[in-house]
Amino acid sequence: MKKEKAFIFDLDGVIVDTAKYHFLAWRNLANELGFEFTEEHNELLKGVSRVRSLEILLSIGNVKLSEEEKQRYLVKKNTEYLSYVNQMASDEILPGISELLDYLDVNKIKYALGSASKNAPLILEKVGLLNRFTAIVDGNDVSKAKPDPEVFLIGAKKLNMKPEDCIVVEDAIAGVEAANAAKMMSIGIGDAKLLSEANYVLADTSDFTTEFIKKILN
């Protein structure tokens, strides 16, 4: 008998692309503080918590702020980011993902979300996917950031699956490292050089063909 498998998906860069909205909000904040924040700089913030992202941003601009000012800017950044998120719709689901979820549903394969974002349920609701996931693990459920495997181990538990029977889909190296640390199969989405530690790497989400899914499930 074929062994049952389950999927755990990261959110940003896998299900939707909210990185562009983070970038706009951080760039506006940097402009306000008097320095330039580029898309190259933004790469440093991928998969990083909001607090740590602000620290990186401030070091780029060589700006020092009091704790009180930092808190104020964190709230401001998140408010602006959420204003973009609230305008999201189903057309922002990345190519191939709706078809992949349909395939998993038809074949009764469970899947969960494993994201550091505290806004994950809101984003899924906006794009019409909230009720599709068997389980959701977001920033409110975890105390340790990726590459710590906590988010994926909680996901496996919520799916009632053993870690080694879970397949993680990630676009960040920290996420791939977290999946590997959890002893799960890892599929990287993006640059093959950057994500070389993943078991499989796809250039983008549209490469999730039926053939590829069947291959990894077997």
Image (cartoon, helix red, strand yellow):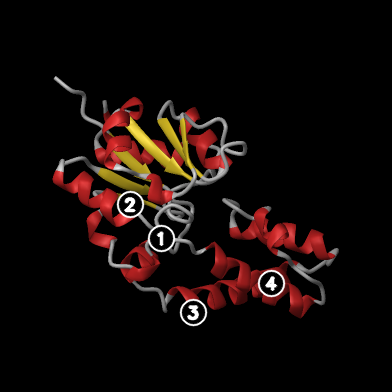
Q: Is residue 190 left or right of residue 7?
A: right
**Mark 3 or 4 closer to N-term?**
4
Q: Quadrant of residue 132?
A: bottom left
Crowdedness near tag 4: few (<14), some (14–19) or many (≥20) residues, C-alpha within 10 Å: many
Tell me the distance, in whole angstroms, between the alpha carbons under discs 4 and 2. Answer: 30 Å
**Residue 114, can we see it?**
no
Q: Nearer the viewer, mark 4 or mark 1?
A: 4
Q: Are marks 1 and 2 in contact (CB under 8 Å)?
A: yes
Disc 2: CA contacts within 10 A as few (<14), some (14-19) or many (>=20): many
x and y percent of residue 134 in the render?
24, 49
User: Real-space Cα distance between discs 3 and 1?
Assistant: 14 Å
Which residue type carries mark 2?
Ile
Mark 3 or 2: the one toward you: 3
Residue 18 visible in image: yes
Percent x, y for residue 79? 54, 77
Which comes sooner in the sequence, label 3 or label 1?
3
The quadrant of the picture occupied by the N terminus is: top left
Query: Does 172 sit left or right of 102 as displayed?
Result: right
Q: Is residue 130 left or right of residue 35?
A: left
**Residue at the spot of label 3:** 83
Q: Which mark is residue 27?
A: 4
